[in-house]
Amino acid sequence: MDDRRGKGRGAKDGKKGGFKKKFVFKRRKFCKFCDEKVEYIDYKDVRLLQGFIPERGKILPRRISGTCSMHQRGLMHAIKRARNIALLPFTAD
Amino acid sequence: MHEYETIFIIQPSLTDEETETLAKVFEGVVAEHKATMIKSERWGKKRLAYRVKNFWEGTYVFFEYLAEPSVVTELERRLRIHENILKWISVRKDPRAAAEEVRKAARLAKAQAAGMPGRDMDDRDRDRDRDRDRDRDRDRGADDGR
């Protein structure tokens, strides 16, 4: 199981520099929003929200992103609003 | 009185003047009900994330105003009736949102001070839109008219 988790994180880091995953070991997930002390997630901030919708257009689950429940909820509301005015897709194929 | 924000999307095939007049019409709706307009922004033509009434893009207009709830109802009613409006959304502004805007501005200023002027954010948006367009057009090329 540890192995699989390692890979997942590696893939994420892999964007930046190819072989980096070899050096990165376990890192605790943390809530990005708590870290930055975000109080309210704005639905107009497409750039921010896009980080939480993978290719398919679904909302990234918090078991992957590590977002805390409070912020995940805020994020969900923001994404749903953004979808409503066509800033984000409902689905993408 | 509460702060509200409304975003609506105008049909892209209108000329700039027509679009502007239309935006002015809805500004008028807010004004004539003793409401105060705080912000009225034109975001310009943007790609839609999905097709709306057979359009892939639309002109976004953003209003932020202080008003009674009835104003929102009226504005939405008018938007619903108008044929050149593709979509709209009205939201009562979250009190925490203001603090968040301040925080964001501060962070941006800090980033710029740190010597990361970078490119204009709008440029990046445009690039993203362009890339998305290209990908989508390529994908759609194969099975057009679906």
Image (cartoon, coloured by chain):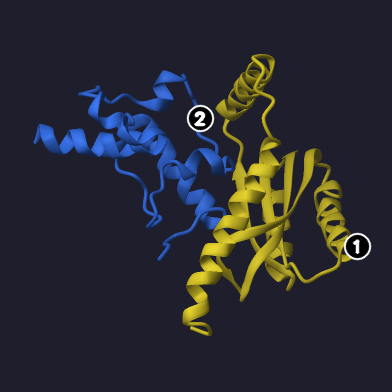
Picture colour for chain B: yellow
The one nearer the camera, B84 or B13, is: B13
Q: Amino acid at mark 1?
A: Glu
Q: On what subunit does the disc labeled 1 rest?
A: B
Q: Secondary structure at mark 2?
A: loop
User: In the rendered image of this protein, does residue B142 appear above or below residue A60?
Assistant: below
Query: Which numbered tag is attached to residue A40?
Result: 2
Indicate whether B45 appears above or below A93: above
Tint applied to chain A in the drawing? blue
**Is A43 left, or right, of A25 in this rendering?**
right
C-beta proximity under 8 Å, tags 1 and 2: no
Would residue B42 be found to the left or right of residue A45 on screen? right
Where residue A13 sits in the image (x, y, percent)? Answer: 34, 33
Q: Label 1: which residue?
A: B17
How far across and how far down the image is residue B101, in percent?
A: 63, 27
The quadrant of the rendering that contains the N terminus of chain A is: top left
Residue A91 horizontal/vertical position (percent): 41, 62
State the SS at label 1: helix
